Amino acid sequence: MNILSRIEGFFASKSYLSTYALRFGIGFVFMWFGWSGITDTSKWIGLVPEWTSFIASPERLVVLHGIFELVAGLLLFAGIMTRTVAALLAIDMLHIILLVSGATQIRDIGIEATLIALATHKE
């Protein structure tokens, strides 16, 4: 048995860990961005579209979005309502991908795919 087969076999026997890896990894990302939105609001205000001003101030929208991401990240990390939370975050990420252009879009597409995988993963 060659080394590649052994590596393949090792990881195949650990497939039950995939959901944990997805949950912890993406949960941490959203906890970080959520906390950043709450504590460093000025960093994110420039991404708030002007048309949203009739809803609330950009500062308030950034804080509310930060709270949403922080709570959603915590829920993913804890494994609470995983599919529902991942689906809601996937909708949120799709909105961000369509709204914000640039190099970060590539990263966001990867995050979107991870959320879809988590929302549709059969446990």
Image (cartoon, rainbow, N blue to C red):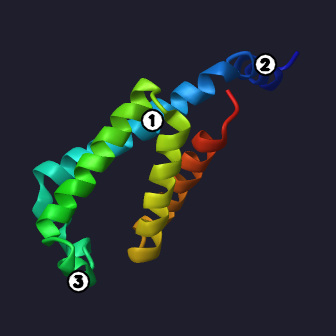
Q: Which label lies toward us, 1 or 2? A: 1
| Residue located 53% across and 29% down the image | 21
| Residue located 67% across and 37% down the image | 121
Q: Which residue is mark 1?
A: 25
- Secondary structure at badge 3 equals helix
Kind of residue at badge 2: Gly
Quadrant containing the C terminus is: top right
**Image height check: is 80 above or below 41?**
above
In the drawing, what numbered circle is on residue 71?
none
- Secondary structure at badge 2 equals helix
Q: Earlier in the sequence, mark 2 or mark 3?
A: 2
Q: Are marks 2 and 3 in contact (CB under 8 Å)?
A: no
Q: Would you say residue 101 is visible in this rendering?
A: no
**Image height check: is 23 above or below 30?**
above
Residue 78 percent location from the top left of the image: 41, 25
Q: Earlier in the sequence, mark 1 or mark 3?
A: 1
Kind of residue at badge 1: Gly
Front residue (pair 123, 53): 53
Q: Which residue is mark 3?
A: 50
**Image height check: is 83 above or below 41?**
above
Residue 71 percent location from the top left of the image: 30, 39
Q: Residues within 10 Å of mark 1 (few under 14, many from 20)?
A: some
Quadrant containing the N terminus is: top right
Residue 48 as seen in the image, left or right of residue 110: left
Q: Would you say residue 85 is visible in this rendering?
A: yes
Label 1 to label 2, Cα distance in Å?
23 Å
Q: Which residue is mark 2?
A: 9
Kind of residue at badge 3: Glu
